Image (spheres, helix red, strand yellow):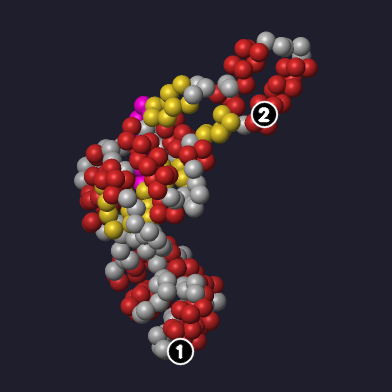
Amino acid sequence: MNIESPDKLVELLDRHAYLADEGLATAAFLALRMGRPLFLEGDAGVGKTELAKALAGLLKAPLIRLQCYEGIDAAQALYDWDFARQLLHLKAAEAGGVHDVGRLEAEVYDRRFLIARPLLQAIETQPSVLLVDEVDRADDEFEAFLLEVLSDFTISIPELGTVKASTPPVVVVTSNRTREVHDALKRRCLYHWLEHPDFDREVAILLRKVPGCGEQLALQVAKAAERLRAADLVKPPGIAETIDWTQALLTLGARDLDPDLAARTLGAALKYREDVQAVVSNGLLA
């Protein structure tokens, strides 16, 4: 798809229910045009993952997600052999009287027994959008491995040979900044810090994302979220939480943000007991 400008990308993302500001649209546009991974950093719930989903939608490409976590290694990101099926194949061959060791070895390491994990899936799928989510949860060794793969989108499988992407996937890497990601990986990418949306944008997002939400409720929830983010909370609400909060209020029949109902549904927006207690005791919902 030929996207002529950041403004055009804003328009296309809007059609997929993602309201991007000028800075984010410019970073995403450049990443698409330059063929570079887009590194999005910011608080949880500000829309990093949703951007990857919206890009996949507008590009009509599958979204392939690599969820990072502590202890993830190359095998869990690249590929694995289906040992159970390989063993069944060997037993079937033995039962059928096949004893040619060379033939069996070649068969057992056939491509049909290979389980493609997200990185290999993205390299073999054209076009595709690869989301490397929460890379800050992985360790340094995995970061170094990821940097190598993102450099040339080539994977070596000893039993089968080299697999190289004919068309590299669009790559979005996200981080919640629970730790600092090494500069080497960031240098490979185009970097953008994703802020919480401003007031007007948050209202527009709520009206778009929450069916049945009236302007009055959207304005009041966005204003309350603004106050909560200004408070000294363990985890201020992101846009994902304000959407959940609005949906919870609508489910209970609210048409405006009544302080009592807001307090009773606060668990949709805040996820720490200390935060809920601080908000209620300080009258931040009044």
Query: In the image, is 282 to the left or to the right of 99?
Result: left
Circle 2 SS class: helix
Circle 1 SS class: helix
Give the amino acid type for the residue marked by disc 1 in the picture.
Answer: Ser
Q: In percent of the image, x 36 and y 47: which residue is there?
A: 172
Q: In percent of the image, x 52 and y 34: which residue is there?
A: 79
- From the top left corner, tell me how far across and down residue 223 is, in percent: 35, 78
Q: Which residue is mark 2?
A: 85
Residue 221 shows in this picture: no
Question: Looking at the image, which is closer to me, 192 or 32?
Answer: 192
Q: Which residue is mark 1?
A: 281
Tell me the quarter of the image containing the C terminus: bottom left
Tell me the quarter of the image containing the N terminus: top left
Q: Is residue 166 magenta?
A: yes
Quarter where residue 177 is shown:
bottom left
Q: Is residue 9 magenta?
A: no
> Which secondary structure class fits the magenta region best?
loop
- From the top left corner, tell me how far across and down residue 174 is, in percent: 38, 52
Q: Mark 2 and mark 1: span between their CA atoms?
A: 59 Å
The numbered disc on residue 164 is: none
Query: In the image, is 33 to the left or to the right of 52?
Result: left
In this rendering, the answer to whether 48 lies above or below 84 is: below
Badge 2: few (under 14), some or many (20 or more) residues near its Cα, within 10 Å?
some
- From the top left corner, tell me how far across and down residue 95 is, in percent: 78, 17
- From the top left corner, tell me how far across and down residue 280 is, in percent: 46, 86
In the image, which is nearer the foreground, mark 2 or mark 1?
A: 2
Residue span colored magenta: 165-172
Query: In the image, is 253 to the left or to the right of 180?
Result: right
